[in-house]
């Protein structure tokens, strides 16, 4: 509030100076507004800049007007500071003879200079200061009216006039000096409060809508989306973000940045707060970063040292790219991974970045989870792209007491058309003989663009409960005779409640006759599969693909058909079934088959 009162004192000081000229101190210099920028040149030395060829009347009068001005600086960090009083030399010309717009110009220039310091203030404090300004202005107005009423007690008519708003020609009306002073006080205060509030709002918007951007909440850094409107120069230095370039990464695509990235990664992993959650993100600004060693983004490490809230983020797909250029060793599942989650990773977040494998045999992440030793859980990917010949992007595995490795969310993720998958994009249940790996559950894919060359996209040898919403899924292997499949669902046995697949509004495209949409081995024991408003018929018009293709095969465990429903879909080729029991559980409702009539669409083997 003291800072708010300083605004009133600052304005009152200007008004006093305007009405009561005094002699200027010997060291005084002139304060003139810079009309091009809206700022004042306030200095302890005479202004030596060259004068314009012809100054306007308003500008000449501003330099001769006798105005005391105190530059009050308000900021949360420095409090109230006062610059030396700056004024011009008095002249014989009276203030009333000056044009009113000159005073307004001087006041506006002062406001601009003042707002530069007001901007860091938050809107609540500005509102409080403005309230105090209005209260003081109202009190001064009432006191003035009372004094005038007492001085005119012998003239009731004139006393009555003092209580009304008179015309500008009437004595004591709005044109009176004291009334003008009140209006100037309120007007200037309003300009300062309004401009200050606007500046504060602009400052808040530039850092994501918060006026307390430098304060951490619970140890968490500002979310990535809040910095979207910040200048690029501030992104790298934003609190809560560790920039790999600050640790020596070059990002030119050829320099080996492994050591720098590992150092930055270790700094992030060391930033845990009292609750064990990481308070800093690993940030890759625009560039191509070459990595030549496995585990560069996450080592196997000590399973007892848990990692919570690990965030890896870039500047955008194809803007920030990590090239995994290690030599593939093969054999050990804990080798050849860019990240290894050894039962200690929770809340992994990856966003706005591209990962590219430089050679076959490399994996993006291997997740090993054990109920007794340590588990992994909660993964989210937003606007992430994978490129190149990956062996496997995500692998889920564990010992006899496997558990969790669950809750996977993919939003607007992308596989480029040069991706060749050796094993799968996501392989859940890498040791299918371990029934506990059915606990690897809950996968959500939203608006993803998986347009890869060949290989298996999703393999659920164990685990499941998969939901897919929207997107474009294309197998691009037009000239390579390589089997590819979007959904590989091997036969069980499986535990209950894990065999659920729901696909809504996805456009599939199979560009080779041997490409498959689904190879289903799930059986009737709690098996439920639904495709709603989907299509795989983009190539149905091509004779070498449409009529000869078999996009879906049913090979249920023990021959027992699960519940399968196709609703409002457009389908090409034929489906084939090896079910021996409960064949009626396969239902087609309001579907359009493009190459065969419905009575010939399903081939029973």
Image (tube, grey):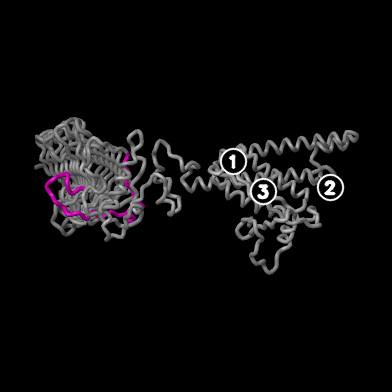
Q: Residues within 10 Å of mark 1 (few under 14, many from 20)?
A: many
Q: CA distance from mark 3 to mark 2?
A: 34 Å
Q: Nearer the viewer, residue 373 or 84?
A: 84
Q: Is residue 164 left or right of residue 461?
A: right
Q: Nearer the viewer, residue 74 or 450?
A: 74
Q: Farthest residue toward the bottom? A: 53
First in sequence, mark 3 or 1: give its number.
3
From the viewer's side, name the closer residue of 64 and 83. 83
For residue 73, side relative to residue 225 (left or right)? right
Residue hosting label 2: 169
Residue 171: percent from the left, percent from the top? 85, 44
Residue 146, picture quadrant? top right
Q: Residue 80's spot in the image, x, y percent?
A: 60, 43
Q: Which mark sits nearer the N-terminus, 3 or 2?
A: 3
Cα separation between marks 2 and 1: 37 Å
Answer whether residue 291 is visible to the viewer in this image: yes
**Residue under circle 1?**
126
**Residue at the image point whose x is 71% and y is 50% from the top:** 68
**Majority secondary structure of the magenta segment?**
loop
- List x then y, in percent, for residue 601: 16, 45
- Identify the mark at residue 70; answer none if there is no mark: 3
Numbered range of the magenta stretch? 309-337
Q: Is residue 596 visible?
A: no
Q: Secondary structure at mark 3?
A: loop
């Amino acid at each position: 509030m003291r800072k708010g009162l300083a605004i009133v004192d600052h304005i009152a000081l200007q008004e006093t100076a305007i009405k009561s000229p005094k002699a200027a101190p010997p060291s005084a210099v002139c304060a003139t507004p810079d009309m091009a920028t809206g700022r004042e040149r306030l200095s302890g030395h005479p202004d030596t800049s060259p004068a314009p060829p012809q100054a306007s009347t308003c500008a000449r009068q501003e330099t001769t007007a006798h105005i005391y001005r105190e530059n009050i600086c308000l900021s949360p960090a420095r409090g109230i500071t006062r610059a030396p009083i700056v004024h011009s030399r008095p002249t014989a010309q009276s203030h009333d003879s000056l044009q009113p717009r000159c005073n307004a110009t001087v006041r506006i220039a002062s406001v601009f200079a003042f707002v530069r310091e007001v901007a860091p203030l938050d809107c609540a404090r500005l509102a409080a200061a403005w309230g105090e300004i209005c209260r003081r202005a109202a009190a001064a107005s009432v006191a003035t009216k009372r004094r005038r009423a007492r001085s005119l007690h012998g003239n009731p008519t004139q006393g009555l006039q003092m209580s009304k708003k008179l015309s500008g020609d009437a004595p004591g009306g709005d044109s009176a000096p004291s009334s003008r002073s009140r209006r100037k006080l309120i007007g200037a205060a309003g300009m300062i409060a309004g401009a200050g509030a606007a500046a504060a709002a602009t400052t808040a918007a530039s850092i994501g809508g918060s006026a307390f951007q430098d304060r951490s909440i619970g140890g968490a850094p500002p979310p990535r989306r809040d910095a979207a409107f910040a200048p690029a120069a501030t992104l790298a230095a934003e609190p809560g973000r560790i920039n790999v370039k600050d640790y020596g990464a070059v990002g030119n695509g050829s320099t080996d940045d492994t050591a720098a990235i590992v150092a930055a990664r270790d700094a992030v992993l060391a930033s845990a707060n009292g609750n064990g959650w990481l308070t800093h993100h690993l940030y890759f600004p625009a560039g191509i970063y070459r990595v030549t060693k496995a585990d560069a983004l996450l080592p196997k490490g000590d399973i007892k040292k848990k990692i919570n809230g690990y965030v890896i983020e870039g500047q955008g797909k194809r803007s920030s790219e990590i090239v995994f250029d290690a030599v593939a060793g093969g054999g050990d599942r804990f080798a050849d991974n860019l990240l290894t989650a050894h039962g200690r990773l929770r809340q992994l977040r990856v966003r706005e970045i591209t990962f590219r494998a430089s050679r076959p045999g490399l994996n993006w992440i291997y997740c090993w989870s054990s109920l007794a030793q340590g588990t992994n859980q909660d993964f989210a990917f937003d606007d992430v792209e994978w490129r190149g010949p990956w062996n496997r992007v995500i692998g889920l595995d564990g010992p006899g007491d496997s558990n969790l490795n669950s809750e996977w969310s993919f939003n607007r993720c992308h596989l480029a058309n040069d991706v060749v998958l050796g094993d799968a994009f996501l392989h859940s249940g890498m040791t299918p003989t371990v029934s506990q790996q059915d606990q690897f559950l809950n996968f959500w894919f939203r608006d993803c663009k998986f347009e890869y060359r060949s290989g298996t996209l999703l393999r659920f040898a164990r685990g499941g409960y998969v939901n897919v919403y929207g997107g474009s899924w294309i197998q691009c292997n037009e000239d390579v005779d390589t089997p590819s499949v979007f959904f590989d669902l091997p036969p069980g046995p499986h535990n209950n409640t894990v065999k659920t697949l729901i696909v809504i509004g996805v456009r599939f495209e199979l560009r080779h006759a041997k490409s498959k949409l689904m190879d289903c081995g799930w059986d009737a024991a709690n098996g439920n599969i639904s495709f709603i408003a989907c299509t795989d018929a983009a190539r149905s018009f091509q004779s070498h693909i449409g009529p000869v293709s078999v996009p879906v095969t049913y090979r249920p465990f023990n021959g027992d058909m699960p519940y399968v429903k196709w609703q409002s879909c457009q389908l090409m080729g034929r489906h084939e079934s090896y079910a021996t029991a409960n064949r009626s559980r396969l239902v087609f409702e309001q579907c359009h088959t493009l190459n065969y009539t419905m009575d010939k669409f399903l081939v029973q083997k």
